[in-house]
Image (cartoon, grey):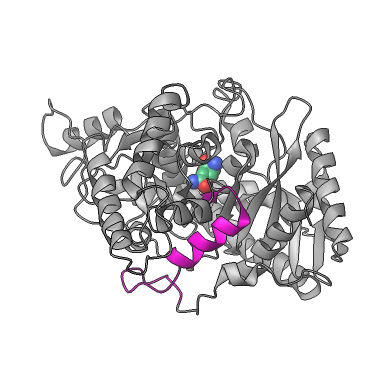
Amino acid sequence: MTIAAARSAVAERNMSAQALAESYYDAIHGVDGEIHAYLSICRERALAKAAEIDQLAEQGAPLPPLAGVPVGIKDVMVTRGVRTTAGSKVLENFVPLYDCTAVAKLEAAGAVILGKTNCDEYAMGSSNENSAYGPVRNPRDLARVPGGSSGGSAAAVAAGTAVFALGSDTGGSIRQPASFCGVVGLMPTYGRVSRYGLIAFASSLDHIGPLASSARDAAIVLRTIAGRDPNDATSADVAVPDYEAELEKPVRGKRLGVPREYFGEGLHPEVRSAVEAAIQKLATLGCEIVPVTLPHTSYAIPTYYVVATAEASSNLARYDGVRYGHRAAAARGLTDMYRRTRDEGFGAEVKRRIMLGTYALSAGYYDAYYLKAQKVRTLLASDFEQVFKQVDAIVTPTCPTPAFKLGEKADDPLAMYLADIYTVVADLVGIPGLSVPCGETREGLPVGLQVLGKHFEEATILRLAHAYEQVRDGHA
Ligand code: GLN
């Protein structure tokens, strides 16, 4: 279901919001045993919200924009009274005392929160195999991963167990699973959406955004969750446009940059041909295709894995067993308690990141790794500044390959990190990006087209994705 379909079913009283929520719970009951997109459901909260909407509808009162729309929330966003695990054993029994701003805004707009979606532990991963609660399976092929770290959110939308879902993107975690599952995923500009209540992975890279079944739905959700929030000092005081209204503006004359570095070694041939065909479709709509170069691209992955791990090692210091989360039972003294708590609580990938980040920040190595990475980050930003003088948006593949098999890269962290090659740069530079489905491989695996935009120009990339969807589906 699209947002519009769900909203009008409820508004026209073809279906009560409560019945709609129940139908989604039936769907979860039916398929989620296999897919495992959800870690918790919050039926009471959902049905209470739905009842509130039904009462408004009965009274003929005006309905809020997401009235009765059933949604999933990645389990890295805190929800008052609803267990929030971040995919980690550390937070297995953690029940937050407040709501993440983005979640509160959705509910205030009438959305019905069905439950919390599965993800890699602390959002660290590209396959959802790092969840302490078991992997998610890709609804398009159950032998394959849904991508990560917002794998549960992408799979729920693809499987029809949520109309849309919120995810988080630190190095591609919205766009990459969107690409693998065949849905739309939008990472807004850094600062566009408040991070208040998002469990921190790497604070200078973390973003909240929607996974949805169309650019239109992503536009509606973004408008709802965006805006300045006094609880997040990095949230931007920039006017939020009506992204849905902007969708219909023409794309003719838009200049689209195609960076040659994104079409090189390692790109799966069927991904390449699907993405090239999509770019051709955009050309038929009157977009001008401009070859461009982003010369520092090859440094993006090493830069990301220094900055992200450094920030993670600092952010994750708080899980010490003192204030909340897991605490080791049999400890001899405080230091032993810290050590055992963290050893028992964290999974292998999280420990790897903490060690890498601590190393990069330690005296004697700081200049060689962390400081150097920050300088390269500036160079990456200047690559984009140059290119955005010539073009309105940049189009690339979202990922070098379609969804891989469960277990295929699980023992090779470096191969896993390379799956993020086209996505991490936008996080480092703070620009918005989205992934829109642009076809399938012969095996029926979805391929994603990535569209990157200028700071705060989500409207432009959403409009391009929307225009592309019309020609892709053949009713332009
Ligand atoms: N796959 C990347 C990582 O493992 C990105 C994760 C993310 O965006 N949260 O760090």
Q: In the rendered image, which quarter is residue 391 located in?
A: bottom right
Magenta highlight on residue 264: no
Magenta highlight on residue 217: yes
Magenta stretch: give its range.
211-236
Residue at the spot x=68%, y=46% of the render? 398
Instruction: Pinpoint residue 105: horizontal percent, then vertical percent.
Output: 36, 63
Q: Can residue 360 be seen in this view?
A: no
Q: In the rendered image, which quarter is residue 132 located in?
A: top left
- Taking 73 as reference, is 400 left or right? right
Q: In the image, is residue 92 above or below residue 472?
A: above
- Taking 60 as reference, is 215 left or right? right
Count how many numbered circles sit on residues in the image: 0
Q: Nearer the viewer, residue 227 or 361?
A: 227
Q: Which of 414 and 54 is in front in this view?
A: 54
Q: Can residue 310 be seen in this view?
A: yes
Instruction: Pinpoint residue 415: horizontal percent, then vertical percent.
Output: 63, 31
Instruction: Pinpoint residue 129: horizontal percent, then vertical percent.
Output: 48, 28
Q: Quadrant of the C terminus?
A: bottom right
Q: In the image, is residue 178 above or below residue 256?
A: above
Q: In the image, is residue 132 above or below residue 457?
A: above
Instruction: Pinpoint residue 15: horizontal percent, then vertical percent.
Output: 39, 47
Q: Nearer the viewer, residue 301 or 213?
A: 213
Residue at the spot x=33%, y=60% of the render? 57
- Taking 85 as reference, is 376 left or right? right
Q: Which of 272 and 34 is in front in this view?
A: 34
